[in-house]
Image (spheres, rainbow, N blue to C red):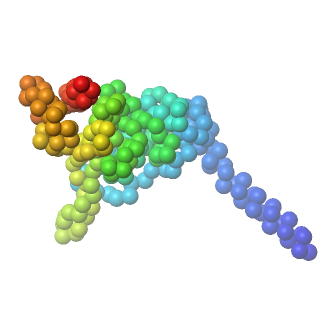
């Protein structure tokens, strides 16, 4: 009798596991048809918005998807539809069912697998520096001297119709530079110059002045050229 109960229980558990695996298998087939990939791309969980903000949204740029190449554990998946949640610091992949043409729930990519995300002009990489609080950074330049842009949004409370509701801030930025002595944030010319040895500061300050640069609103291209110049100065 005990043996019979054991085998019945084992059968029921096996059937239960098999039944639960069907949605997973179906999802795997859908992704394989769409991307022809292994579990690296689609082993994340479905994305659901945790809040319904009365103001703002959590995404980089806009609420629309952007196209990018995903580099996961050395593999590249081209031209994927993505969103970057700046509140939770997560990349979200969207896809369309190749059979029904209906939109599925987006999934959150597993951060530990992401090497980088590349768009036409921007490169996001997984953050390796404890001095930078965000999980990902935009790489401006990376050599002996490196520069990164940290992007994030914050959730705050706002009163609407006598209720306290959640809202999301505008996009916030913080720049960091890595030199042989460490990783440091900077906000303006003064804080940027303090990162470098005194004997190099005069030359760097002259470059900033002659090129009429404002580090409060500098674009990526001019910032990259500045960092390359600083790297050259350090090597002299």
Total labels drawn: 0
The quadrant of the picture occupied by the C terminus is top left
Residue 97 place in picture, x, y as percent: 53, 37
Asked where in the image residue 177 lies, by quadrant, the reply is top left
The quadrant of the picture occupied by the N terminus is bottom right
Left or right: residue 101 versus residue 126 is: right
Inspect this view and state whether residue 100 appears. Answer: no
Residue 196 place in picture, x, y as percent: 20, 38
Query: What residue is shown at x 50% (from left), y 30% (from top)?
Result: 76
Q: Is residue 142 above or below residue 44?
A: above
Query: What residue is shown at x 62% (from left), y 49% (from top)?
Result: 23
Asked where in the image residue 228 lies, by quadrant, the reply is top left
Residue 136 place in picture, x, y as percent: 37, 43
Q: Nearer the viewer, residue 28 or 212?
A: 212
Inspect this view and state whether residue 158 appears. Answer: yes
Asked where in the image residue 186 lies, by quadrant, the reply is top left
Query: What residue is shown at x 89% (from left), y 74% (from top)?
Result: 2
Residue 140 place in picture, x, y as percent: 29, 32
Left or right: residue 70 versus residue 52 is: right
Query: What residue is shown at x 37% (from left), y 36% (from top)?
Result: 124
């Amino acid at each position: 009798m005990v043996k019979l109960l054991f085998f019945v229980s084992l059968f029921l558990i096996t059937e239960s596991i098999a039944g639960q695996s069907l949605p997973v298998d179906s999802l795997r087939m859908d992704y394989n048809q769409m991307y022809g990939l292994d579990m690296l791309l689609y082993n994340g969980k479905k994305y659901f918005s945790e809040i319904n903000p009365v103001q703002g949204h959590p995404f980089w740029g806009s609420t629309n998807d952007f196209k990018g190449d995903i580099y996961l554990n050395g593999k590249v998946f081209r031209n994927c539809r993505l969103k970057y949640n700046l509140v939770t610091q997560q990349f979200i992949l969207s896809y369309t069912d190749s059979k029904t043409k209906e939109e599925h729930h987006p999934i959150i990519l597993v951060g530990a697998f992401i090497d980088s995300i590349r768009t036409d002009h921007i490169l996001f990489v997984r953050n390796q520096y404890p001095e930078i609080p965000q999980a990902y950074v935009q790489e401006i330049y990376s050599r002996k001297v490196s520069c990164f842009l940290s992007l994030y949004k914050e959730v705050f409370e706002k009163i609407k119709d006598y209720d306290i509701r959640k809202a999301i801030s505008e996009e916030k930025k913080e720049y960091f530079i890595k030199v042989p002595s460490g990783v440091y944030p900077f906000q303006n010319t003064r804080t940027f110059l303090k990162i470098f040895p005194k004997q190099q500061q005069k030359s760097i300050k002259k470059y900033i002045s002659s090129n009429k640069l404002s580090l409060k609103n500098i674009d990526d291209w001019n910032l990259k050229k500045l960092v390359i110049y600083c790297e050259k100065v350090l090597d002299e």
